[in-house]
Amino acid sequence: MSSTVVAGKDVLDKPLKLLFPVWVVISLLIVLFPVYLVFMVSVAPGSALFGERPALFVEDPTLRFWNDILQRGDLWGPLFKSLAVASFTTLLAIVIAAPAAYVISRLPVGLRYGVVIGLLVTRMFPEFTIGVSVATRFARLGLIDTYGGLVLAHLIGSLPFIAWILVGTFETIPRDLEEAAQIDGASKMGTLLRVVFPLAAGGIAVASLFVWLYSWNEFLYARLLTTNQNTLPLQVFQAIDRGSRQQMATVAAVLTLPILLVVYFLQRYLKPGALAGAVKG
Amino acid sequence: MSRSQEAAIGRPTDVAVPRVGFGRWFRKHKLEVALVIPLVAYVMVLTVVPILDTFRISLSGRAGNSFPSAQNYTSIFASRVFRTAIKNTIIVSLLSLSMELVLGMIVALTLHAKFFARGFVRTVALIPLGVPTIVSGAIMLLLFSRSGYLNSLMFVFVDLVNNIPGVNLEFQALSWTVAGGWRTLFTVAVADMWKVLPIVTLIFLAGLQSISEDVYEAASVDGATKWQRFMRITLPLLVPFITMAIILRAIDAFRIYELALVLAGRIEPVLGTYIGGRYLPPTNDPFTAASASIVLFGIIMIFIVAYLKFVAGRSRSA
Amino acid sequence: MADIALESVTRKFPDGTLAVNELNLEIAEGEFVVLVGPSGSGKSTALRMIAGLEEITSGTVKIAGKVVNDLPPRDRDIAMVFQNYALYPHMSVADNMGFALKLRKVPKEDIAKRVKDAAELLGIEDYLQRKPRQLSGGQRQRVAMGRAIVREPAAFLMDEPLSNLDAKLRVQMRTEIAGLHQRLGTTTVYVTHDQVEAVTMADRVAVLRDGMLQQVDTPQRLYDYPVNLFVAGFIGSPAMNMVPARVTSKDSGAVVVFGSHEIKIPAKRLQASKLEEFKDKEVILGIRPEDFEDPDLIPERQEENLLEVKVSLSETLGSETIIYFDVDAPAVLTKDTMDLSSDASVEEAAASEPRNESTFTARLNPKTKARGGEAARLAVDASRLYFFDPTTGRVIG
Ligand SMILES: Nc1ncnc2c1ncn2[C@@H]1O[C@H](COP(=O)(O)OP(=O)(O)O)[C@@H](O)[C@H]1O
Ligand SMILES: [Mg+2]
């Protein structure tokens, strides 16, 4: 190689070394500034927001908008609906998907991958392709504006995903343990309840947090299936549509706060595969 | 199958083994079957059937008795709004996809390097994942509108630069979102990118961590520069991860809805907002919505197949 | 306690693998039977059919006289120790051991007492509150044993329970398990691929190959009277020397010739067997390493049967000396001998040009002067020669 370059040292070294800290700070700002904005605007007095050059800092923060939404009470309905739907979706998703995922994890390899890929393919369809039919039918069945209807819809997206994650979890539990339990006198069901599921508890917990997150954030099905009782994301949208900036920011902050906490606790489980299914752009 | 054939199969001969085996298999695996049935039934009733049903709706005429008919498809393709929506969807998707890949790679490389407070930076980098999509839409409105904070930041920057003697920059406040055209689409793409950058970064980071240090050491002993190492070693070894990122992200990018709804609204429709707009009041037109959603699925499929065939396939054989 | 009987038991896997083929085996009440054979010979499959973990394709398995083919494991009253122990990771040692009793609704105090007794027996009473991952390999092995013992089952089934332990611990646990069996007297079926383990522990050993039972007998009789080349080569360490040979008559009586060597066959040995029929035909001669000796160290010399050899290597072990020497006759390469060797070099050797040379092993009194690189004379105990039919591999006797 006709190189003027000595190993380990090259033209890129100097600029990289200088720019690296600058770049890290800039990228931190890119991530943090938008989040800061939500909380900042939610406490900004009206005067601070206008003009071509709105202030980047609030000098006289006000809790007026927080007080407003808390007292006016139109936050509680959506908050409660979002909480209830996310929680029931999670519960049902586990009850339906965990036993099935166990069985799938015990299939012969070829069949197992076939089933898992089949589950993932359902997620390639746009929600609208499923949702147009589902919403039309739900309307006929009187499921619009009900918690049940939205839970059913959120399960469509959650089940394949959680089943997929849990198949991975169950695959890590050695079959020997099930055989040992059978020899010890457990029935098939007993083996599942006393050995397999307790061992999968960690994986199930993580997967259910993902499902909870998905349902809490979900917007499209909620919009198709709602006419008057909003979920929180719909409430944010309504505020965007016709509220003031501060109202919008305040509801957005309410929606965001619990999730930042969940993500913080989930971060060590944030594996690319899981994410791709759990969080969508 | 005739009755006599069935009887013959029922007899315990060698041929009959698989059939007799099935009954026994079923009796032995009753529990397993019971455990999968709810999931299978759910996916059938609430995913497979609706997909087929939407397909049926898309082929149904408004008059009712003209199934199957391509009328819905001909009328949407005749609509200029729909064609714009397709064009915009593709532009936004490709734009956000390419920005995500480039930036995701840079951020992943950054987080892969060892530096002070890397753990903290990694945690912070994940934050956008925790921000609901609709909220990130709201944020982008705050940033990009006429009296938005991007303008504020630009003014701060320009003022800083103008402190340098002899420099005199002018900056005009811009409205990005309602401008229409490229600027609006760009806003949507940036919003999408901000939201999903952590996913792409994590995928690439997993890829980088899967490359053994030895390879780099061997390369630098051979005298490769950083850039050469990146182009000749890192990138080729990351191909499977890049493919994964592209496919996963493309599926979602083409389906973009909330961000486009908030940021582009009716000014620049994408397929998601077009479908939603037709289906929801006041239009209430499930036929158009159904056929447009099938077209959207078709676009996703074409993209994935084409990508796997031309790009991923070729780089594997190279 | 119970007896176990396998009658023509066969297991054919869906992919066509015939893992166990027409296995007949009776295990008496209280007996310690070891299934031994090379890896893949169907030992685990056979054991798992007794346990009820593997479907029985045909044949019957009886426990205590009752056909159990269609009973699930929990109704067979057997306990099993797995190769990698299969301890429940989420339960403490005590809960692991008491799990079966809890499922049987045994009162809590009884469980606690039985767990404590078993733990004392195994010396693990200090670890009862720990989780399996906090234990060493040896301790885990004991817990697995304890889990079986607590049950007081009709039979113990053990699948290579010691193979994950280091060599020293393995020897120690070997004696402990044998001691436990003596104390409890529970019928035990024990699977291993290690013939030393098999012969040191078993009342009777069943040798399997390719899913087929070769021979069942006491360790001593297996050693003395192997039915074929495979068993002869499998039992005994170092392994029996085997070489193609020819039996012919000479003036002085019958001799067996291999390469340039010759050994006189005692008249009694010839008359007592069918060896006559093989006169002047090819046979395979087997000599156990133990049946060589340094002629100077035999107290009362008898009829001379000496081999002149050149020692290529000697290993002094203190209690004995092992020497290796080459014999100018080809190695025996039949299916039997190849099955014995897990390493591919044998098959390679079979594929390549046959070399007219094979290596013998002899186990000598440590006082011998034989050293590597030197010539030596070896006495052979001609009364203990083995002859095999080269076409069938069966012993000629
Ligand atoms: N589930 C299975 N499916 C197909 N073949 C199997 C299965 N389990 C074991 N076998 C095959 O059956 C034979 C005997 O296996 P095994 O009983 O485990 O042998 P061993 O315990 O003696 O090593 C081997 O050839 C093995 O590959
Ligand atoms: Mg085995």
Image: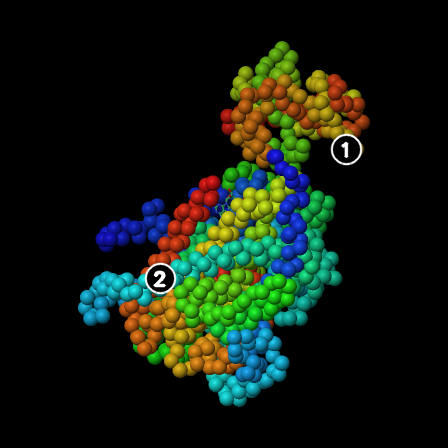
**C176 relative to B251 in the view: left or right:** right
Percent coordinates x, y for residue B7 in the rendering: 27, 53
The label number, if any, that marks residue B282 in the structure image: none
Nearer to us: label 1 or label 2: 2
Q: Amino acid at mark 1?
A: Leu
Q: Residue C143 is drawn in which quadrant?
A: bottom right
Q: Name the residue: 68% across, 27% down.
A: C361
Residue C357 versus residue B73 in the image, above or below: above
- Same chain for the residues at labels 1 and 2, yes or no? no
Q: Residue A268 is drawn in which quadrant?
A: bottom right
Subunit of label 2: B
Q: Nearer the viewer, residue C231 or B211?
A: B211
The label number, if any, that marks residue B86 in the structure image: 2
- Report the Cα–Cα distance between label 1 and label 2: 84 Å
Q: Which residue is mark 1?
A: C317
Q: Quadrant of the N terminus of chain C?
A: bottom right
Question: Of helix, strand and loop, which one carries label 2?
Answer: helix
In the displayed orientation, state which residue is furthest to the front. Answer: B166
Subunit of label 1: C
Q: Amino acid at mark 2?
A: Ile
Q: Name the residue: 69% across, 23% down.
A: C325
Question: In this view of the protein, can residue B18 be seen by the observer?
Answer: yes
